[in-house]
Amino acid sequence: MSFPIRSPRHQTGGIVVLARVIDKIRLNAEGKLPEGYHVGIVPGNRTFDDRLCKFLGVDFEALSGRVLEGGSDDEILDWCFKHGQQPSAEQIEVWNAFLTKRGWRDPATTGFEKSKAEAGFADRDDIQTFFDVMDAEEGHA
């Protein structure tokens, strides 16, 4: 069986992370979110879930409610655009570049190095970002 949460690199409407957040919301509601995973806003911690909601201009609880109503990823993205904001192609390009490189030579590097070591990948030079750690842990890479 493949891992039940899509790679953070998976794109919906050209946007990374959204499909992953949708998966986590659904799994959490079913009581099937894997141990050690969180969903939503974590006070004092800028999660990818939090960043995605700020990028799309939607409240996480409202997004969760919409996801649990059902529908495709594209329908949920359209809802986000209607109830939040629709980023331009350039804003999406910057968003994707920022997140796909998170942990590599940026303010999150210390946290990334800790996560990488905790995952048992301290000796792997091919793992350079948070996305790389997630993909390696989950068997996406």
Image (tube, rainbow, N blue to C red):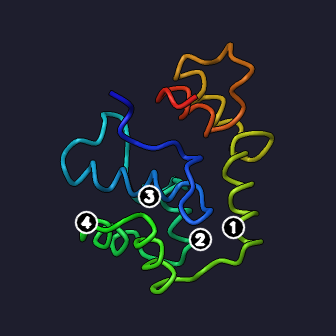
Q: Secondary structure at mark 3?
A: loop
Q: Secondary structure at mark 4?
A: helix
N-terminal-most mark, 1 or 4: 4
* Residue under the image location 59 percent in, 47 percent down: 9
Which residue is labeled 1 in the image?
92
Q: Secondary structure at mark 1?
A: helix
- For marks 2 and 3, give the one nearer the viewer: 2
State the image coordinates of residue 118 (x, y, percent, origin top left): 53, 22
Image disc number at residue 59: none
Residue type beneath disc 1: Ile
State the image coordinates of residue 8 (x, y, percent, origin top left): 55, 46
Q: For the residue carrying disc 4, how many other residues have a C-alpha within 10 Å: few (<14), some (14-19), or many (20+)?
A: few
Which residue is labeled 4 in the image?
68
Q: For the residue carrying disc 2, how many other residues have a C-alpha within 10 Å: few (<14), some (14-19), or many (20+)?
A: some
**Which quarter shows the C terminus?**
top right
* Residue under the image location 38 percent in, 30 percent down: 2
Instruction: Say above or below: 54 vs 31.
Output: below
Residue type beneath disc 4: Leu
Assess whether mark 4 and mark 3 are in contact (beta carbons under 8 angstroms).
no
Assess whether mark 4 and mark 1 are in contact (beta carbons under 8 angstroms).
no
Which residue is labeled 3 in the image?
43
Which residue is labeled 2 in the image?
55
State the image coordinates of residue 61 (x, y, percent, origin top left): 33, 70
Q: Secondary structure at mark 2?
A: helix
N-terminal-most mark, 2 or 3: 3
Q: Is residue 93 left or right of residue 39?
A: right
